Image (cartoon, rainbow, N blue to C red):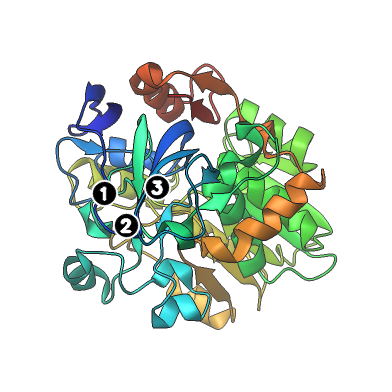
């Protein structure tokens, strides 16, 4: 089959690789009909995520048609159309039974390696390094899905792929980000990053009762999307000081809830911390540029909440813990507990309450994936969200 493979910093290729096969009784194999390129995939392209190996298959936002099933699979049938969440969960361990699906204790075969870095291992993830299991990803013609009865969301309606595809990651991720922000009716919510997850965090903030949403970015088309589809007020951080503007908008109190939808590769415009981050990353002294997280702590109102759906990788420094503690802030983060949200959000889509396809700017064949990665990373050609169609 054809698949997008990683071969080092900035080097991804569409190559012929062996077809996936059933390895365990609970597996299925799907023929991939659509697969997204996620902002967190850029951390792989840019060489920030450790434990990648040459030839690894990328992608963690797939859906498709079930073509093979293992002997123990009961709920999913051949021919079913399914969305596959990026997290792999067993459904039986301590964490799965608590609904903490992204903390599954059994699906990362490299858990010991992950624990050395993090203290404990997260769940296995599709297409996201050997630190999270080394599972082949879904930017490919076919994909093996372990624990299919737990993981696969069967789509029984005739909704097109592009309306349900983002249940694989970014819609639930943005929704959980808003939930983690503890939004109360009438709150002002500031969202850093107007990429795909940020766009869904903006839309979700309104669902939780926000009275005002302020979106922060520097890319004109992203800011325009946040205004048009998210009804957000916007701040271009290259044209105004973010702290000053947020204080002005909130009469000096600061936003009640702050969402960092940027993560490890944040950019700043001349601030000292951003300059230091960039210099350290250039000589491989850090994997994370945490400018946005620092700024969110500085801007958030006292006793407010910071939600972090943006991916961090290693050991970011210069975090203003004094401000965090003395302001009495709360921070919530984590990979998304996908199964908690997928069915609920599918019902919203089926009821016409939201059409997630608004975020798509590019629909391309798998063969165009390397060029699409470059356009997405470099923010060229108005690229906000790419859907690959193998």
Eyeballing the image, is 135 above or below 370? below
Q: How crowded is mark 1: few (under 14 residues within 10 Å), some or many (20 or more)?
A: many
**Is 312 positioned to the left or the right of 248 in the image?**
left
Q: State the SS at label 1.
A: loop
Eyeballing the image, is 387 above or below 196? above
The residue most toward the front is 71
Q: Residues within 10 Å of mark 3 (few under 14, many from 20)?
A: some
Residue 313: give its label.
2
**Is 362 positioned to the left or the right of 320 in the image?**
right
Tag 1–tag 2 contact (CB < 8 Å): yes
Residue 274: give its label.
3
The answer to whether one can see residue 247 in this image is no
In the picture, which quadrant includes the N terminus? top left
Q: Nearer the viewer, residue 4 or 200?
A: 4
Q: Nearer the viewer, residue 21 or 389?
A: 21
Of tags 2 and 3, the one toward the viewer is 2
Tag 1–tag 3 contact (CB < 8 Å): no
The Cα–Cα distance between marks 1 and 3, rounded to whole angstroms, is 20 Å
Asked where in the image residue 53 lies, by quadrant, the reply is top left
Question: Residue 381: where, in percent of width, then height?
Answer: 52, 16
Mark closer to the chain start, 1 or 2: 1
Question: Residue 264: where, in percent of width, then height?
Answer: 38, 51
Of tags 1 and 3, the one toward the viewer is 1
In the picture, which quadrant includes the C terminus? top left
**Is 229 positioned to the left or the right of 91 in the image?**
right
Mark closer to the chain start, 1 or 3: 1
| Residue corresponding to mark 1 | 49
Picture residue at 66% right of the left edge, 45% below the top = 156
Q: Nearer the viewer, residue 153 or 88?
A: 153
The Cα–Cα distance between marks 2 and 3, rounded to whole angstroms, is 17 Å
């Amino acid at each position: 089959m054809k698949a997008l493979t990683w071969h080092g910093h900035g080097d991804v290729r569409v190559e012929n690789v062996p077809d996936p096969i059933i390895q365990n009784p609970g597996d299925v194999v799907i023929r991939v009909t659509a697969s997204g390129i996620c902002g967190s995939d850029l951390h792989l392209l840019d060489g920030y995520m450790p434990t990648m190996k040459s030839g690894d298959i990328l992608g963690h936002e797939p859906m498709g048609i079930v073509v093979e099933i293992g002997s123990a699979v009961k709920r999913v049938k051949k021919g079913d159309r399914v969305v596959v969440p990026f997290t792999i969960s067993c459904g039986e361990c301590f964490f799965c039974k608590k609904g903490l699906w992204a903390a599954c204790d059994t699906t990362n075969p490299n858990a010991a390696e992950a624990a050395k870095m993090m203290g404990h291992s997260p769940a296995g993830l599709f297409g996201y390094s050997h630190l999270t299991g080394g599972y082949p990803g879904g930017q490919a013609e076919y994909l093996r899905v372990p624990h299919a009865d737990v993981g696969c969301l069967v789509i029984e309606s005739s909704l097109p792929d592009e309306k349900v595809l983002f249940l694989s990651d970014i819609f639930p991720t943005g929704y959980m980000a808003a939930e983690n922000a503890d939004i109360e009716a009438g709150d002002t919510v500031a969202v850093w990053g107007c990429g795909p997850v940020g766009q869904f965090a903006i839309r979700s903030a309104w669902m939780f009762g926000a009275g005002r949403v302020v979106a922060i970015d520097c890319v004109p088309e992203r800011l325009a999307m946040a205004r048009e589809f998210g009804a957000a007020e916007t701040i271009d951080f290259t044209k105004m000081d973010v702290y000053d503007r947020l204080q002005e908008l909130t009469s000096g109190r600061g936003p009640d809830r702050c969402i960092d939808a940027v993560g490890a590769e944040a950019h700043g415009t001349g601030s000292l911390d951003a300059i230091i981050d960039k210099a350290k990353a250039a000589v491989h002294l850090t994997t994370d540029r945490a400018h946005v997280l620092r700024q969110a702590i500085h801007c958030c109102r006292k006793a407010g909440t910071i939600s972090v759906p943006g991916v961090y990788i290693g050991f970011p420094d210069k975090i203003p813990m004094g401000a965090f503690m003395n302001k009495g802030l709360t921070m919530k983060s984590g990979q998304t507990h996908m199964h908690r949200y997928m069915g609920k959000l599918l019902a919203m889509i089926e009821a016409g309450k939201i059409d997630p396809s608004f975020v798509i700017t590019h629909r391309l064949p798998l063969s165009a994936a390397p060029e699409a990665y470059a356009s997405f990373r470099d923010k060229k050609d108005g690229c906000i969200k790419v859907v690959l169609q193998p």
